[in-house]
Amino acid sequence: MRLIQQLAGTVLLVVTLISLPVWAAKIALTNINLVDVESLTIKPSQTILLQDDTIHAILPDSQPIPSSYIQVDLAGKYVLPGLIDAHVHHATEPEGYNNADITRLRLQKLLRGGVTSVRDMAGDVRVLAGLKRSAQLDLIQAPDIYYSVILGGKSFFSDPRTAAAAKGETPGETDWMRSVDDNTDVDALMQRVLGTGATGIKIYADVPASIVKPLADAAKKAGLKVWSHAYIGPDKPSAVVAAGVEVISHIPDLSAEVIPDYKAWRRKDASISEAVKAASFDSSNYHSLLRSIQQQGIVLDATLTVFEQHRDRGPNRELMFQHGIFLTKLALKQGITLAAGTDTFDDAAPLPMLHHELKLLVELAGLTPAQALQAATLNSAKTIGIAAKAGSIAVGKVANLLIVNADPFADISHSSDIAHVIKNGRFIDRGTGQHLPVAANNGASQPPTAEFNWPNGAKAAVSLAYDDTLASQLDVALVQLNRHQLKASFYLQLSSPLLAARLSEWRAAAAQGHELGNHTLFHQCSASKPGRDWVAAENDLDNISAVQLVQQIRLANSMLFAIDGKTERTFTAPCGDESAGGQPYLPLIYDDFVAIKAKTGPVVANMAQLNVHAVEVIAPVGSSGAELIALVKQAAQYGTMVNFTFHGIGGDHLSVSADAHAELLAYLAANRDTYWTDTFINIMQYVKVN
């Protein structure tokens, strides 16, 4: 009973602290295990005194605490600095992938997941400046944001990918996306960069090393950080290192030191000989490069996670991922400072991807949990240039803290066993949940919902969908679905050889009550968007007109009718792209479909605001069964629906394991009274009349 009273008191106190004004009272965190990321040691039985937004003192528990401090007993907990993701992008495509609603949710998830600062590696600074201010003033739940401008050669800004972040301006001629050459007035340029509110410059691509050095010198003189990709072309990474950059991103691209014509190999999937491949894994070929990086104190931002996500998107991508593991191990052995950045999001994951990056650094690259956490705190703070005020627990530093339930130096997974997050001296409300000590909600996290009545008193609807006509969907997913008597939707690419080869099985699936949806004839995607260098020229959505695509989509409907005899259909836009040849095409097919899935997003927040012509989906990759079930539970909490779009199940690309998929289905089958699991078309038909 006494333990229950103590726990109840802690919960009440934390809830009280959450409701305090922006600058909280003086707070004493007592009985803690202090995680020292500078010495890589755990200091038990410590007290941290927080005053306003600052760490005021660190005392042994035996020392008296001034009576003016509110005491929070954190016995058994471990307190470490707030994590810092050294590589994110929140404004690359402000009207699309980075729209305002989903960006707020991503920022909120970052903060609740223990990430208290991020380095945004270029986007539309008109958006980033506003987010930075709101985060700094704690007007939104978000980590503090430090962003860059992009500098590149003139040829780079002909890349259509730069258009979205410079919308309304000309890429290469704006202060946040500037082309540079031998005639650039570098000092004047840096003054304009300062005017954007940026923390640093990012040297992206097509910049000769002879230009990098004056850029780096001018940036440092202006008080700006100098950040660069490992390979910017045309020169090798060693030339970029010699030019004076401070931080290099994407460790796998250091292999450009060995692989000739690296741009063609990386961007166009050009082939290399077995001899070159072997040479790219010969450590002796990197000794000089890595020694120079270490001697100059350059920080390497590994970004293993994004390369892992892309490993099945082209013949060279798996090799890039293996380069990342190999070269991170070499950098660690050389004593190079490593930072932890992700360069990606996974909206289906319950926690920020930085926790996954830590896992990769430990399990694959050989870092100890202590070294990985140092990379995600102190070293990432050095990357941004804020180590004097953040990145470790020390007197005078900002009170950005992550409190976990178990020793993170013993097991890196403990970094995600989060008890509390503190930013600027305030406890962050992490939402409701049985495993959380905070049950109250300050209104910033729960989406506004209107009551929606699902069939038979269900609390939520669940749509299970499978894209791209894959063998594992027939061999694994369909078998599991039928075993649990659950109905799902399969979105077919009508030109897929697997459709013709196994047509009778797809037709049988439709006869069993599963939906066959339209996923176009050729699965064309826009090659101009970031990370789309895997799109073949013949499948580039930028190269056909909206009218041509609509004709193909209607032909696909006719082909589907020949398979299942259905006249009503739903549609999933390949890659979530909504334009063809630069023109929106979805409005042209509104009348052809009951509903359309057009983008990725979170669990539906409010059924009253659902747009049936642009339904958001969660596309899990590598998610565990528990993570998938957590999303289903969230839908029930909101009283809405969750739309899963899977690809491979236990195989193929963008896959989820067969075990994780089976765990989700078993949960849904065991809770039929709570969750209405049906085809997307059946759910949307119900929604439209209710």
Image (spheres, rainbow, N blue to C red):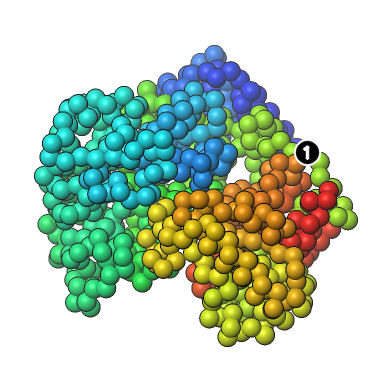
Whole-percent x and y of residue 527?
41, 58
Q: Nearer the viewer, residue 503 or 215?
A: 503
Q: Amino acid at mark 1?
A: Ala
Q: Nearer the viewer, residue 188 or 429?
A: 188
Residue at point 21% right, 60% down? 256
Residue at point 63% right, 78% down? 474
Q: Nearer the viewer, residue 456 or 376?
A: 456
Residue 5: name its quadrant. top right
Label 1 Cα neighbours within 10 Å, binned few <14 / some 14-19 / many ≥20: some
Q: Would residue 474 be found to the left or right of residue 205 on screen? A: right
Q: Is residue 496 visible?
A: yes
Residue 151: name its quadrant. top left
Q: Would residue 193 be found to the left or right of residue 309 on screen? A: left
Whole-percent x and y of residue 255?
23, 62
Q: Say above or below: 650 vs 214.
A: below
Label 1 element class:
loop
Q: Say above or below: 228 vs 438.
A: below
The N terminus, quarter of image: top right
Q: Say above or below: 657 vs 641.
A: below
Whole-percent x and y of residue 483?
74, 76
Q: Would residue 216 be found to the left or right of residue 418 on screen? A: left
Q: Is residue 526 visible?
A: no
Residue at point 51% right, 73% down? 652
Q: Nearer the viewer, residue 70 or 562?
A: 562
Q: Would residue 535 be found to the left or right of residue 207 on screen? A: right
Kindly identify which residue carries mark 1: 450
Residue at point 54% right, 14% down? 68
The residue lying furthest to the top in this view is 68
Residue 657: name its quadrant. bottom right
